[in-house]
């Protein structure tokens, strides 16, 4: 009996089921059916993956996915031919922004990675009253944001996203409130002291959704009051208390499910 699996290919990844998955690269521009893989992606493509000329790959530009082919390797880039635009739909039909109070240690990195995989479009680190981590020096903030955006990029590539979600800038609580008020968006705030209003009962009737997650110690009561004045729906995620690094992932996944984006 003939196998139904596609043949394995040396220039791509193979899933546990044997199906071929092409490698994926973001590019800066496409001109006349050509694109270039540059910088770290070029080194990864040539020296780590060792993709040969002629290998088919996915190229992503301006939120669109294309099937391409490596035409030639040059000194600092790989020149690629665009074969056609892909018909795959990778991005969710809603834009979810996660406003995340910065947790201790490396938890923020996990939060960024997993929420990018789920489909979140934007991540805003926030410093609230009970936030333990305080970033007062600009050089330290820039270093943190650079690291966090790199993690977002890696997660976007791994999860086959068509966009790399931006992380930052870091907001104070007041700056976050001002930002939330600036646009007509649905604002959802999971809160451990809310018992009656469940996220499952919230009707998502807008394409822009903001999820606001407090720090390890939770929001102060006056912060919750300010969020309500900004138009937020304060909700429970269930009878169990979730860690700050878990709450955003759960809320994001529920929003994706409720809008048929899973």
Image: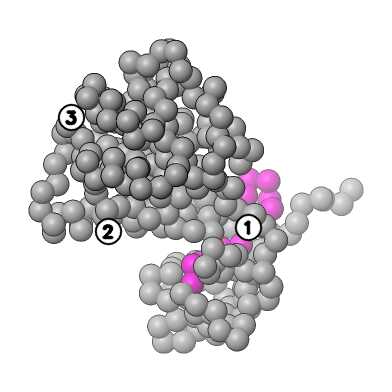
Q: Nearer the viewer, residue 95 or 217?
A: 95
In the image, 85: left or right of 153? Answer: right
- Residue 21 quadrant: bottom right
Q: Residue at x 34, y 57 (%)?
A: 150
Q: Residue at x 38, y 70 (%)?
A: 40
Q: Position of residue 9 (x, y in %)?
A: 66, 63
Under tag 3, what secondary structure?
Answer: loop
Give the residue pinned by disc 1. Answer: 21
Report the disc number at residue 146: 2
Q: Determine contact: label 1, label 2, CB under 8 Å.
A: no
Under tag 2, what secondary structure?
Answer: helix
Let me know if residue 250 appears in the view: yes
Q: Determine contact: label 3, label 2, CB under 8 Å.
A: no
> Does residue 233 sit above or below 9 in this rendering?
above
**Outermost right residue:** 1
Quarter the C terminus occupies: top right
Report the disc number at residue 130: 3
Indicate which disc, 3 or 2, sits on the residue closer to the N terminus: 3
Q: Nearer the viewer, residue 30 or 198?
A: 198
Write the start and end of the magenta stretch as one range.
14-27
Indicate which disc, 1 or 2, sits on the residue closer to the N terminus: 1
Estimate the spatial distance between the alpha carbons at disc 1 and disc 3, rounded to whole Å: 44 Å
In the image, 161: left or right of 128? Answer: right
> Does residue 174 sit above or below 141 in this rendering?
above
- Residue 103 quadrant: top left
* Residue depth check, mark 1 versus mark 3: number of the one nearer the observer: 3
């Amino acid at each position: 009996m003939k196998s139904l699996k596609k043949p394995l290919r040396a220039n791509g990844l193979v899933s546990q089921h044997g199906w071929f998955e092409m490698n994926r690269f973001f590019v800066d521009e496409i001109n006349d059916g050509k694109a270039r893989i540059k910088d770290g992606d070029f080194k990864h493509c040539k020296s780590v993956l060792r993709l040969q000329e002629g290998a088919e790959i996915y190229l992503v530009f301006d939120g669109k996915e294309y099937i391409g082919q490596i035409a030639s390797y040059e000194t600092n880039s790989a020149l690629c031919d665009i074969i056609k635009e892909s018909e795959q739909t990778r991005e969710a039909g809603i834009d979810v922004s996660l406003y995340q109070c910065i947790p201790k240690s490396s938890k923020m990195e996990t939060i960024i990675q997993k929420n990018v995989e789920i489909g979140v479009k934007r991540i805003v680190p926030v410093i609230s009253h009970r936030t333990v981590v305080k970033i007062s020096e600009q050089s330290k903030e820039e270093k943190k944001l650079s690291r966090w955006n790199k993690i977002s990029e890696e997660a976007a590539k791994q999860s086959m996203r068509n966009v790399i979600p931006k992380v930052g800038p870091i907001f104070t609580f007041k700056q976050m409130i001002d930002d939330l008020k600036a646009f007509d968006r649905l604002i959802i705030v999971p809160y451990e002291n809310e018992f009656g209003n469940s996220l499952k009962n919230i009707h998502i009737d807008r394409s822009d959704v903001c999820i606001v997650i407090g720090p390890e110690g939770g929001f102060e009561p006056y912060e919750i009051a300010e969020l309500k004045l900004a138009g937020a729906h304060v909700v429970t995620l269930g009878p169990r208390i979730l860690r700050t690094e878990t709450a955003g992932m759960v809320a994001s996944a529920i929003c994706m499910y409720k809008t048929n984006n899973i």
